[in-house]
Image (cartoon, coloured by chain):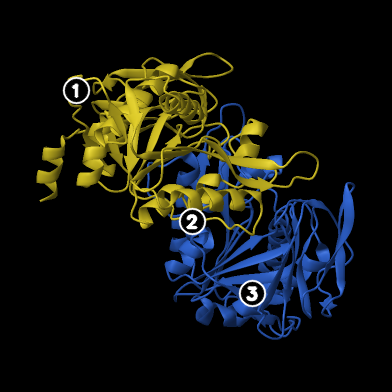
Amino acid sequence: MKEKVLSIATLFGAPLTLYKNTWGKPGGETLAIVSGLHGDHLNGVYLSSRLSQFLDNVIDGGDRDYTLHGQVISFPVVNLNAVQSGSRLWPYDGVDMSMAFPGNPQSETTEALASAVLEHTANSYWGFVLQSAPPHNEDAPHIQTLKLDGRIKKLSRDLKIETVRKLNESPKVSLYSQWQSRGMVAVTLSSGSPRTVNLPQCETLFQGIVNFMKAEGILKDRRKIKPDKNTAPRFYQPEDEVAVPAGAAGMFLKEVKVGTSVRQGQRIGEIRDLYSGKRLEEITAPSSGFLVTLRQYPIVYEKEPLAIILTAKKSWREFLSRRK
Amino acid sequence: MQSQCILSVQTPVGPPVEIIRHTYPAAQSTQPTKRVSLVAGLHGDELAGLYICHRLMETLKNLEAQNPSAFKGEVHVYPAVNPHALETGTRLWPFFSADINRTFGEKNTPSLVAKISAALLDDLKSNSDLVVDFHASNLHLMELPQIRIIKNFEKKLIPLAKLCNVRLIWIHPHAEIFESTLGYNLNQANIPTLVIETGICLRINKNYCDPIVQGILNLLQQTGTLDLGETIAEVASPKLVQPDHVAMVHARSAGLFVKQMQVGKMLTAGEKIGDLIDPGRAREEVRAPCAGLLFTLREHPLTGKGAPLARIATEKPFTP
């Protein structure tokens, strides 16, 4: 059910309206999914719309294989003005919506939107923020989390996402941190590049979220299908990350794909001078590992990270033994 | 004066991005001396700080030539710490759409912006006993020259802030968004840092900036960094405003705000501040909810519901 949550009068047009989708009835545990905090993070917006289509079909009886037993709510687009502007931030206020929480219902548009989203999601049990890579980069689908505990382990396995990346920190003013501080089991699902939709990546995440809902009993599958082989997520600590910096400025031409493994010394790409076309630098992998982030936009400054390699991947068992 | 590039980054098409520190050393450096750093241009559209730094550097240059023994301590000036944003006149570094003053202390995989903020923070920590960070307001609000102090830092900062010839010292509650700012991180590192806010972005208001130039010279004199003898002009005593002594006026609806006041005016309760107009409905008069000093006023007419229109410093605690 699409529901109007907030309507903000605008000066020259129709009111700006924030919509929430809800499927299922309250009472049980709720999954909240939020996308479109940045206006150019379109993978998440598309993925959310794909989930809406699927859950609408389940509720309408169009998909007889599934029944919904829990509750799912989603905010497909939050930073409405930025999406309409085709930009990461809304040019009028320049506020980074990922740093606008908890917001304020009495304040300006961006803060009022943040407040409404938090108010409507804060009582959920699970929370997923859908995002794309930072500007000019592409992410392989992966989970970002501040905690690596048993609940996140189970969630990662159920989502069938192999790469789980622990962050050093998340700003307290992010939606993710606000959810965490309220005891929700929350993660960020990052994939793709700003301003683009990567359908295969979205399909991977869509299947993962459907699987998660089945595993948690939010969704029941009438078919007696033997589950796929369990995914074994790999957990990466901040110190397992290796950033590959640009030693020169120019045009970066990549030679590998994000989401693949690279060997130490393998060529990742090269930087060429814009005027002479001469090769300024050959970029090679300083370590073997999983390429979770890769530069997408070719123009680069010196010292910018061109890639992030996750090294020393560990299974959950290995991770726990190292903590002891 | 010695100039040093603390960080240089090659760019794809032009000259490098360089952050420069200009140092006016102490005349006699045998003993530890007071070190004061002045920072401007974190936001590329806030030009007041650049102007203030330019005026101060002019004064310090003359002093260095005419009376070098006046330098009892070191003065460091970082006049333009976000060069590409300054060149485009935008708050954010346009290539990254990133606000440098929201990246200090970031611990995740560094972006170039975070690397720059880390380099600046390290350099300031290594070279400063006291920092002044100059800002103008954003495109929307006009601010009376003021120093903003986060609650809990006030004990150390108020005596220093009183020396700077601003009209107002506003002690405001902590908010988590401040934790990624330069001022917060330096104060947390026990380096007293004053954040000066004056005027509005993309403009230079000499009437606001020139007194601050005098105030900074006074700060340098009173902290023993400079010895200017009797030549220093007397500075004004600022109004000290506690968190509960500020009345915020917000727009109750969207419209065009047409101001009828100037910041710095002492208002009486009910006095008209401006009109909020919309062709489709009746004009809404915006009036002061209480008496006090008008220290913030909306300048950008385009106004959304809930947008700040004014801030008033009151004599008594204000309850909306």
Q: Which residue is mark 3?
A: B170
Which residue type carries mark 1? Answer: Pro
Q: Colour of chain B?
A: blue
Q: Nearer the viewer, residue A1 or B146?
A: A1
Secondary structure of the residue carrying tag 3 is: strand
Which numbered disc, 2 or 3, marks the residue that appears first in the sequence? 3
- Residue A209 vs B288, above or below: the answer is above
Q: Is residue A161 above or below residue A78?
A: above
In the displayed structure image, the side of residue A100 where residue B308 appears, left or right: right
Of residues B235 and A39, the one nearer the viewer is: A39
Q: Are marks 2 and 3 in contact (CB under 8 Å)?
A: no
Of badges 3 and 1, nearer the viewer stands 1
User: What secondary structure is marked by label 2?
Assistant: helix
Amino acid found under the numbered disc labelled 2: Ser
For the residue marked with disc 3, what is the amino acid?
Trp
**Residue B4 in sight here:** no
* Residue that appears at 38% across and 14% down: A255
Would residue A25 appear left or right of A276 to someone viewing this image? left
Q: Secondary structure at mark 1?
A: loop
Residue B177 picture location, percent across and down: 51, 58
From what the image shows, is residue A238 above or below residue B136?
above
Q: Colour of chain A?
A: yellow
Counting the numbered discs, the total is 3
Residue labelled with disc 2: B180
Q: Position of residue B116 (x, y in %)?
A: 49, 46
Category of crowding for the residue at label 2, using alpha-carbon neighbours closer than 10 angstroms: few (below 14), some (14–19), many (at least 20): some
Q: In whole angstroms, how far apart are the C-alphas of marks 3 and 1?
A: 61 Å
Q: Are marks 3 and 1 in contact (CB under 8 Å)?
A: no
Q: Is residue A166 visible?
A: yes
Chain at numbered mark 2:
B
